[in-house]
Image (tube, helix red, strand yellow):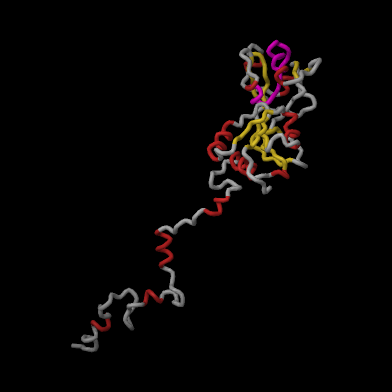
Amino acid sequence: MTDTAAPSSFRLGYVPGVTPTKWVHVWKERLPDVRLTLVPVPAAEGGGLLRDGGADAGLLRLPVDRTVLSAIPLYVETTVVVLPKEHRLAEAAELTLAELAEELLQHPLDDTLGWERPPGLPAIERPATTADAVDLVEAGVGLLVVPQSLARLHHRRELTYRPVTDAPQSQVALSWPEERTTDLVEEFIGIVRGRTVNSSRGRAQEAEQPKEKPTKQARAKAGQQPKQGQKPGQGQRQGQKQGQKPGQRQGQPSKRAAGGGKRGRRS
């Protein structure tokens, strides 16, 4: 962890389709004095943003350059095909790549699924962005396979989407420059991992938490232990008269003593 003075803000980059809202809310509750600034960045430029110091951490799509960046995978997205509502394939609940083999598929330059060539028939020209590709699908020119969050982000009233069960998937991760793992980065790591406020790393008060008081049951159990220098069971024999058997009430004569007067007398 880097020992640096606490800055007044924390910059979080995020790529299209990723929604950091829930983590931002937790940050504001735990660190109200540290402003969190969101920095939107295109998917292909997320790693460069972190390397150049444009953000302290980022919610990016894998893979990232692991020689300089650390990454914690968070979740894997469902892959869907975007198509017109009136398209014949829209009647299916889910689809496979084989069912798209005869369809014209758009392959934008900012594709996030990592395949060299998607299935289906290639378009004459690749659109520059996913948004441009969605516009073409809306105009009736082909279909588009993307992570589900991007289909929602670029929603059009006349379009719908269906899961593609055997398509590549996109994985979202929290990433940051390894050499700049600051206390605030550790705080955000704790938030995305679901740690409570008392278990988050980087908090000095964690070591200052008072020890829990022993419960009544623990105190009673501790009281049954023999005192120092006392043999086990010695305390239980205290108060017993010499010759008194275990379990015999104090003052109660033994059977031998009670019947001693009659023993030896025969009629």
Residue nearest the observer in this picture, 198 or 105: 198
Q: In which quarter of the image is residue 56?
A: top right
| Residue in the picture at 60% in, 39% down | 192
Please state if 113 lies on the left or on the right of 242 as rendered.
right
| Residue in the picture at 60% in, 35% down | 35
Residue nearest the observer in this picture, 167 or 126: 126
Query: Residue at the right extreme?
Result: 124
Total number of numbered discs in the rendering? 0
User: Where is residue 250 shown, x and y percent of the image?
Assistant: 27, 77
User: Where is residue 141 shown, x and y percent of the image?
Assistant: 73, 12
Please state if 225 lies on the left or on the right of 69 as rendered.
left
Q: Quadrant of residue 166?
A: top right
Instruction: Give the extent of the magenta segment.
Output: 133-151
Please state if 201 lies on the left or on the right of 246 as rendered.
right
Please state if 131 lies on the left or on the right of 253 as rendered.
right
User: Where is residue 16 shown, x and y percent of the image?
Assistant: 67, 26
Residue nearest the observer in this picture, 132 or 233: 132
| Residue in the picture at 73% in, 22% down | 98
Q: Is residue 238 above or below residue 36?
A: below
Q: In this view, does 223 lie above or below 97?
A: below
Query: Residue at the left extreme?
Result: 267
- Residue 122 in magenta stretch: no
- Residue 136 in magenta stretch: yes
| Residue in the picture at 79% in, 18% down | 126
User: Where is residue 108 shown, x and y percent of the image?
Assistant: 75, 21
Q: Quadrant of residue 231?
A: bottom left
Image quarter (top left, top right, bottom left or bottom right) of the C terminus: bottom left
